[in-house]
Amino acid sequence: MINNSSNKQNQVRQSVKPVNPPTAIFRGNNYSLNIYEDWIDKTLYTLTGPVTDGIQHNIIITHEPNTDLDTVEEFGEWQIQGILSSLKGCMLLKKGAKKLQNGMDAYEAIFSWYPTDELRIYQQQIYVLHEKIGYKITASFTKKTRKTLGPQVERMMLSFNPIKNSSKK
């Protein structure tokens, strides 16, 4: 008796093209994942805080690997223009140089917009450029929570400390 199931499995194995080995390993929070050519790690981290004044507060950290920009101000301005062009009704309230707690140069922007008729949001972003990687640290507030939670959140944002890439020589 011939096992048709085994024959089909062998045919499938023979028709599958060999796969190139992974080019990198992504390491996340207690896990890893193989990454193949043409895939880019654009990990987004979200740290959630209290729900106050009707919104879930959080800090979001994103990164832009292999940026070709030379200064943190250039990176910040590039990010600011992206937000102003994509977020309808967004107003830039403030921008300028900032220092992280570790002494690194950073760039800051504060925006305001109305996602609904009743809710005005203030968003603070801090930009960091380290070893050609651009980082954007974002927090959003209401008018009330900008005063109550804002100082604590800003201290957290300014404690950002990129780790030196040990694979660079």
Image: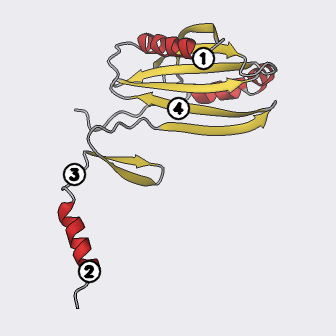
- How far across and how far down the image is residue 96, in percent? 54, 8
Location of mark 4 (residue): 61
Q: Element under label 2?
A: helix
| Label whose residue precedes the other's in the sequence (4 or 1) | 4
| Label whose residue precedes the other's in the sequence (3 or 1) | 3
- How far across and how far down the image is residue 122, in percent? 69, 18
Q: Nearer the viewer, residue 17 or 48?
A: 17
**Amino acid at the residue labelled 3:** Pro
**Amino acid at the residue labelled 2:** Asn
Q: Nearer the viewer, residue 121 or 28?
A: 121
The answer to whether the residues at label 3 and label 2 have Cβ atoms under 8 Å apart is no
Location of mark 2 (residue): 4
Location of mark 3 (residue): 21
- How far across and how far down the image is residue 157, in percent? 58, 27
Q: What is the CA distance from the residue labelled 3 to the residue labelled 1?
A: 40 Å
Location of mark 1 (residue): 87
Q: Nearer the viewer, mark 4 or mark 3?
A: 3
The answer to whether the residues at label 4 and label 3 have Cβ atoms under 8 Å apart is no
Residue drawn where x is 28% and y is 37% of the image: 38
Within-10-Å neighbours for mark 2: few <14, some 14–19, many 20+:
few
